[in-house]
Amino acid sequence: MRNRSTRQPAGNRGFFNQQALIAAYRQELLRPVGEPRILNVTGMGGIGKSRSLRHLRQLSDERRTALVDFRLPGSHQLESFLAQLRQEFGAQHVRFPRFDLAFRELRRRMHPAENPRQPDPFGGGANSLGRMAEAWTGPTITGAVFGGVWMVWLGQRRLHDQRLMKSDPDLADLPQLSTEALIGKLIALLGEELDQGCQGSPYVVFVDTYEFLPSGQDNWLRALVPRLRHGLVVIASRDPLLQEFWPVPITWAEVERLNPAHCEAYLRRSGMSDPDQRRAVAKASEGLPFYLDLAIDTPGGPGRNPPTGTAVSQALIERRFLEHVPEKTQNVLQVLSLARLFSEEMYEQLRRDLQLAWYPRLWDELTRYSFVSEGPEGWYQLHQLMVRALHANWPASGRARVHGRLRKFWERLADKPDGAAGPGPASFAPRQEAVYHGLRSGSMSVSRVLDHVDLSQAGTGSQAVRGIADDLRAFVREFPDASDRIRSLAACVEAEVLLAQGDGPAALEALAGTSAPSGSTLDARLTMARADAMRLKGTTHEARDGYRRLWHEGTGATRLQGGYALADIIMCAGDFRQARSLAAEVYEAPDGDQVLRARTLRLLHLLFRFQLDFPASEALLDRAEAGFREKPRPDHLADIQTNRVELLAFTDPPQALATAVGALAAQRGLGAWHEVGKTLTAQAIAYTRLADFENAEHAFAEAKEVLHISNYRSGRIRAELFHAFLHLRRNREEAALRSLRESGRMFEAAGVYPFLSMLAYKTTVHIGRPSAELEHMCDRAARSVTLTDPDDSLASYELRMERLIADLLSDSR
């Protein structure tokens, strides 16, 4: 039950002196529909921009409106922003059937570990039934009957969705779209269905605290605004938006400071009866409503504080508020001010852990203060000016203790079965919050941070890890005296995020100047990241040295990971026999785990595929997939899909194309662009073998572009090699010869895939145009290839190559 104090919530204390802002807003509402535009509401912190937006929303007559606040954690992401717009307009009877299907596809890619059978997150039907289903749990007859109705409803909904996807050309190709194209489709569908649902009537989208959006991360918002053809977008920001960066006209309107008369009227209406006190507070506030509200919120009630005279300032208003708050209540506010997001459950946990104050209705009193804003699903935040005031006289040691408790709260939440998604639709991942507070408490070791990185990667993929990387960067900026070890940790996680995207050069740049104590977990991660980055960049010998160091000098899991990577790079250098022997050591190591064994089986699958023993390769891939499914991770299962497409491109091209759809969706969702490029290359090979030359050209072009952008050098060389076979199928012999020679030179320069250099030369022989340059490369390459079976001669291997070349140059239908 809410506190029945006489103190009015800030939002009910009137709205003064903003006639110019209101006039600008009304003028924008009068503009003809069909011309998307922005009203930029500007002003300094504490001047009342958020309250102004909410007041303007009340003045929107019958127009449909929605409001998104970037202070809410997670709202900076396109997915959360679009979801909130859709939910708010959906509650106003706007339907989004096509957007919902496209959003579901994006959600599946961004959260590949999420249960695909979960109900639609939008709309009254699904949500209402979902809430009822949650209420009717347990072995009751009513619950069983409702469960049956629920499943029937879901079945009918899925059938309707399938029919819509088949009949609508805008939806039929959703699974095949790249993630960038899917995002563009989503933005277009939202604008289109919003315009249709509003039947041509104007609507308004309010965006609060734009300055909280990280620099350079607003491209999607700039792309969305022009799609809102019948909409006005009102953006509140501290600094004016620059017209040259926005594709629609901007009108600027400033939230003005309240003049002294309006300040006094505001205070009088809020119950401050002493005219001397009103004049002193009005002058000290300098026209900022935040400080007026703080003076009104001062315990004791408006007008019952002693007159303040003229010796007053904004800082004194803050101090007077805190001085008049009972110490036990002030302690609660100080504790909660350290949480970027807090709830009653968090308060109760902290109250027990830290022996905080409690009395009936305390929580209700806290959440009625003007500087407390409510977010989704019972989560709250404090105004940043109040956070500053609460921290001003609080020793760092006291804050560190609370951060430690907050870390434990988020870790407990993360360990719950449903903890990975976080509390609420626009929230952080709990492990990200655990790291945030763990660093500030000084209680979280580097190894524990890396544990949270790994668990986040295993749970929701690289999206969650990016949040941890962002917070680590921010921590280093916030604390310039952070240790070199913490700086190296931040660089390591940043590099691992870049490596997951296939960007080796950028990862190397992030790792520049990093170091860690020899033999530590961080040292091993830095060594592995640096070696992986060098390998992606194409400096194979340096990468091999890093892996060898881990294998020979590391311990435990670190040593085995180094051994696995060393076996992989030895395999790519053509020494199949040594690679198999080393892989067997890794697989049989007593301290290895199931995931590492599955990865090793996948490596052996590649080894036998490169030896052109496709049956053995397929059997190993099946065993690897079975191992990964025991402890499923989105990235591992996506990589298995990519490998299966690559294998099927040579053995069953039609099935390769069918499998590529899911593989591309999974890899794009993970942001693993080098794996996307590999999948597209295999898809292009399959199209070539099926004589679908136009689609093959498109797939090769996209593959090479993605591999170039992701700086995956060896992948791009492979794509160039196999593109030669498409050139030959289309009677472009000179282009084919250029591709074969170029790929052979690049393979030799990078020291990888000598067997593919042999393939390039034998292709020129097959078409009657033997290349002397490639012949010399082939001779050098053949000397570095050792087969796993001593009875398998190099001549037999070359014969298999010749059969493969013949297959690639003939139809497979």
Image (tube, rainbow, N blue to C red):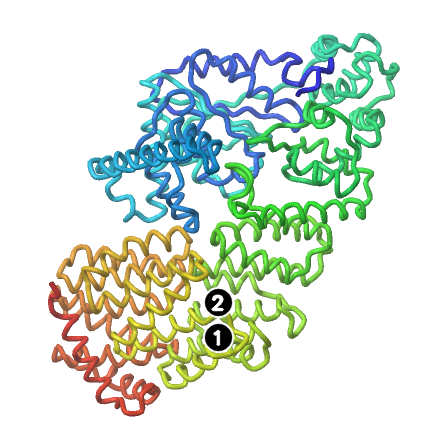
Amino acid type of the residue that numbered disc 1 sits on in the rendered structure: Ala
Residue depicted at x 48% and y 39%: 218
Residue 157: quadrant of the picture: top left
Mark 1, other Cα within 10 Å: few <14 / some 14–19 / many ≥20? many
Q: Secondary structure at mark 1?
A: helix
Q: Earlier in the sequence, mark 1 or mark 2?
A: 2
From the image, tell me which residue sits under label 1: 543
Amino acid type shown at disc 2: Ala
Q: Is residue 92 visible?
A: yes
Q: Is residue 408 left or right of residue 547?
A: right
Disc marking residue 533 = 2
Q: Residue at x 69, y 56 (%)?
A: 444
Q: In front here: 171 or 504?
A: 171
Report, in whole angstroms, how far the alpha carbon at label 1 lies from the one at label 2. 8 Å
Q: Position of residue 44 (x, y in %)?
A: 64, 28
User: Residue at point 43% right, 47% down?
Assistant: 114
